[in-house]
Image (tube, grey):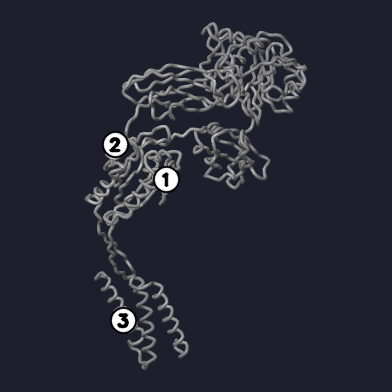
Amino acid sequence: MDLSTVLLIVLAVAAALTLVYFQYFYKNPRKGSLKIILAALRFVTLFCGLILLINPKFVSKDYFVEKANLILLVDNSTSMEDGTSTANLSRIIEEIKENKALNERFTIHQYGFGSDLKRTDSIYFDQGNTDISKALSALNDVFANGINTVALFTDGNQTLGRDYEYIDLNENFTVNSIVVGDTTQYEDISVGFINVNKYAFLRNNFPIETSIRYRGSKSVSRTVTILINGQRVHQEQVNLNSTKNSQTINTLVEAQSVGIKTIKIEVGALENERNTTNNSKETAIEVIDEKTNVAIVSDMLHPDIGSLKKSIESNEQRSVTLLKPNVGQDVLEDSDLIILYQPNRNFSGVYQFLKDTGGNYFTITGSKTDWNFLNRVQESFAMSGSRQPEDILPVLNNAFGAFGLGEFTVDDFPPLTGILGDIQINKDNETLMFQRLQGIDLDKPLFSVLTTSNTKEAVLFGEGIWRWRAQVYRNDKSFQKFDEFMGNLMVYLGSDKQRSRLELDYDLVFDNANMAKIRASYFDESYQFNSNASISIKVKGKVNDFSRESPMLLKGSFYEVDLSDLDAGEYQFTVTAQNENLSRSGTFRILDFDPEKQLISANYKKLERLAHKNRGRRYFLDNVQTLYADLSSSKEFVPVQKSRDNVVSLIDFRILLGLMVLSLASEWFIRKYNGLI
C-alpha cells in the first residue's frame, strides 16, 4: 500500500474523531455510557464513509513463466498417404508432445487441415483438398500475441487457395517445414487448367482453352485429344522440353445438342511415366437453347418487316414469325415478344391479348398507322396535331442507359417517315432518339422505351428502318452494328418480368464433391430477405436410386446445404420454401476428379522457401530428430519469467456500506428509544 494512502486513512480517523468530539463531547454536559455508545456509532459511520471515498488498495505480484507456442500443423489430405502412414506420423507427433525438453520450453498445440483448419488430436488422411495458406493465416490470427513457431507436416502440394509461398505472417510467427513424401522429381506430362464458359448456346461455337505442362529434361512430343461426351472433337500435337515446359491450346467447338456436356482433355503418356492420373482432366458446360420467339404482327407488306426479320434472326437464338393481326391467341401465346407494325383497327384482338397477359411489345408507327384507333386502344402514348407525313432525322441520346448501345450511332442516317404532331408519353420512359426536323433538333421522342409495373415497351415513331440497316452496311460493309443494336433491344424487352422470391446460386458442374454446395436466398412479399424461413432441399440421382431430403442452414444472408458426401454423378434437386407455394429446381454434376492425385512428388523446394521467408528451417520426416534439437537449443524460444500486478481493494465496499447502514440504524434506534432528539 502506498504511503499516501496510509496518510489519508490516518487523516480520515482524525477527521471522524474531530467531528464526533464536536457533536457529542464539546460543551455537552450529558454524562454516562449512552453518550459514549452513540459517539462510537457515529464514528463508525463517518469513518466508513471517508474510507469509501479514499478507496485504499494494495498491489500483489504474481510470478509466472511464459512459454512460446509450438503449433503442430498436420496436412490431413489424401495425398499424404503416398508419403507416410497415419500410424507413423501419429507416432512422431506423440514423440514431440512427450519430449521433456520441448515441454519445458513450449506450450504445444496440435491442428489438422485440409480445406479448413481444425483443432484435433487425431490424424486422418481423408481430406479431398489442401489449403496451406488458409491454415497458416488462421493460426496467424489465433496466435497473434507471444512467440509462436509452427511445425508444418505436409507434402507441399496445395490444391486450393492463394499461393502459400507469398503469404505474410506476423513477425512473432516462425514456420518450420517438415517435408512428407518422395522428393524425387519424376518425368511427367499433365493437363493443367481448363477454361470454358459456363453456358453455350445451341449451334454456336464455344471456346476451349487448356494448358499442357511438362516436367523433365528431354524433348517430348505427344498428342492432345479433346472429347465431348466421349466423342473426339479436336486433336493436336504438342512439343515440349526443359525450357518450353508448357503450351496453351485454344480451339472452338460447335454446340450440337442441348444438355450438360462433359469435356475431357487427354494427353498421351510418357514412357515409364509414374503418375498418369494427371494425364486427363474433365470439366463440363451446359448447352442451352434459349431461343426467343419474336412475332411481327402486320396488316401490310413493307421492307421494314424483312429487314427486322433478318436483323433479329442474325442471332441463332432468336426466331421471327410473321403474323396477321387476326391471328388466334393460342398462336400469340407461343411468342416471347410481339412487334406491332403500324397498328390499325384490325389489331384489337392483339391489344386485348397484351392487356390480359401483360406481355412486352415493340410498336412501330408510320404513315399508315391508324392513330385514332391507337390513341383509344392503349394508354402508353398518344399523338395529336396535324398528323401530316414528314421526314424525320434521328438524334441519338448519349445519356440513354436502359441498355447498352455498343458502337451503334445514327450519324448520317437517312430519315424515317413519321407523322408531324404532338407526342405525349404517359408512362415512365427514357428517350433513345430525338427528332430532327428540317435541321432543327426538337424535344420530341423518335424512339423511346417505356417501363411500368412488370411490362416493358418500346415505340418507334417512324417507318423506313430498313434504310438504317442498309446505311450501316454502306458504312462498314457489314450489318453487325445494326444487328447488335436490335439484339440488345430484344434482350431488354424479352427479359424476365418479375423477380423470383426464391433465388438459387450453384454451379452446374463441381470438380469434386468437396466443392458441392447449393445456396438459396428467400425473400418475403416486400422482397426483404427472410431469415426465419424453413428451406429444404430434395436431391435425387439421375442414374442411381439415391434420394435425400434435408434442411438448408442459414448462413448470414443466404441458406446453404453441403453435399460433400455425394458420389460422382448427375443429380437433380428441388429447393422448397415450407408453408409457401414456392420451389425452384435444377440439376448439377459432380465429376470424378481428385486434385490430390495430380502430383506425387513432395514440393520440398517451395516448402524451403516458405520456411526461409518466415525465419524457420526445412526438415525431412526421416530426420525429424534434428527439429527437436534445434527447437530445444534455440535461444529465441527460451521461457521468460514475468510478473503480473493484481490490484485489490483493501476492504470490500459492500462491507463498508453494510457497517454504515448498521451503525446509522443502531444510532437512530438508541436515540429514539431514549427519547433523544
Does the residue at mark 3 contact the one at mark 2 (Cβ under 8 Å)? Answer: no
When the figure is inspected, residue 318 is found, relative to residue 40, above or below; the finding is: above
Kind of element beneath mark 1: strand
Closer to us: 222 or 658: 222
Q: Which residue is mark 3?
A: 18
Relative to residue 308, is residue 515 depicted above or below? below
| Among the two numbered marks 3 and 2 on one chain, the one whose residue lies closer to the N terminus | 3
Return the residue at label 1: 117
* Above-or-below relation of 118 to 493: below
Q: Nearer the viewer, mark 3 or mark 1?
A: 1
Q: What is the quadrant of residue 260 in the picture?
A: top right
Residue at position x 29%, y 53% from top?
68
Q: For the view shown, which residue lies furthest in the bottom direction?
A: 32
Q: Quadrant of the C terminus?
A: bottom left
| Identity, as a three-letter code, of the amino acid under mark 3 | Thr
Q: Residues within 10 Å of mark 3 (few under 14, many from 20)?
A: few
Q: How much space separates mark 3 and mark 2, taking CA atoms?
A: 78 Å
Q: Residues within 10 Å of mark 2 (few under 14, many from 20)?
A: some
Mark drawn on residue 609: 2
| Camera-nearest residue between 630 and 489 | 630
Q: Is residue 610 visible?
A: yes
Q: Nearer the viewer, mark 3 or mark 2?
A: 2
Query: How far is disc 1 from disc 2 in space, using C-alphas?
Result: 22 Å
Q: Residues within 10 Å of mark 1 (few under 14, many from 20)?
A: many
Q: Is residue 469 left or right of residue 71?
A: right
Q: Earlier in the sequence, mark 3 or mark 1?
A: 3
